[in-house]
Amino acid sequence: MRKPSIIIASLIGIILVLSIAQIVVSTRISTTGIALGSIETQTQALKTENLLLNEKILTLSSLTHIASQAAQIGFTTKTAQIVLSNSQPIAIKQ
C-alpha cells in the first residue's frame, strides 16, 4: 500500500515543478514581447528618418538647388561667345 502513495506524491511534485517552470517561461516570454515591441518601434522610427534624410539629400543635390546656391554666393555664367569668321583651310590642295 505504500507504493500508490509514493506515486501520487511524486506526481504531485512533478506537477508543481512543471507549473513553476511554466510560470517562469511565461514571464520571460512576456518581457521579451515588450522588448520586441520597443525594438520594432525604434526600427520604424529609423526607417522614417532614413526616408526623410534621403529626400533631403535628393533636394540638396538637385541641379536647381545647386544653381540657386551658386547664384547666392556669386557664381555667374559667362555669356560671351567667341565667333570665328575667317576660317583657314586645314589642308591645302596640291
Image (cartoon, helix red, strand yellow):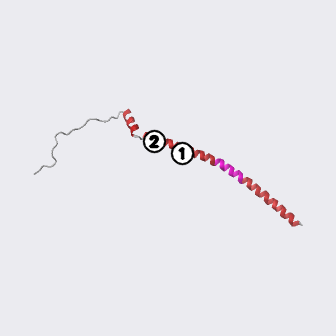
Q: Is residue 53 magenta?
A: no
Q: Say whether residue 15 is left or right of residue 81.
A: right
Tell me which amino acid carries mark 2.
Answer: Ile
Q: Are marks 1 and 2 in contact (CB under 8 Å)?
A: no
In the rendered image, residue 51, in percent from the top left (x then y), is placed at 50, 43
> In percent of the image, x 56 and y 43: which residue is there?
45
Q: Is residue 10 above or below residue 62?
A: below
> In percent of the image, x 39 and y 40: which residue is there?
63
Residue 6's label in the rendered image is none
Q: CA distance from mark 1 to mark 2?
A: 15 Å
The residue beneath circle 2 is 57
Q: Secondary structure at mark 1?
A: helix
Residue 74 picture quarter:
top left
In the rendered image, residue 27, in percent from the top left (x then y), is placed at 71, 51
> In percent of the image, x 50 and y 41: which residue is there?
52
In the rendered image, residue 76, in percent from the top left (x then y), is placed at 33, 34
Residue 47's label in the rendered image is 1
Q: Residues within 10 Å of mark 1 (few under 14, many from 20)?
A: few
Q: Secondary structure at mark 2?
A: helix
Q: Could you tell which of marks 1 and 2 lies nearer the N-terminus?
A: 1
What residue range appears in magenta? 25-35
Q: Residues within 10 Å of mark 2 (few under 14, many from 20)?
A: few
Q: Is residue 33 magenta?
A: yes
Q: Is residue 2 above or below residue 39?
A: below
Image quarter where the N terminus lies is bottom right
In the rendered image, residue 43, in percent from the top left (x then y), is placed at 57, 46
In front here: 72 or 64?
64
Q: Say whether residue 67 is left or right of residue 6.
A: left
Tell me which amino acid carries mark 1.
Answer: Lys
> In percent of the image, x 76 and y 58: which residue is there?
18
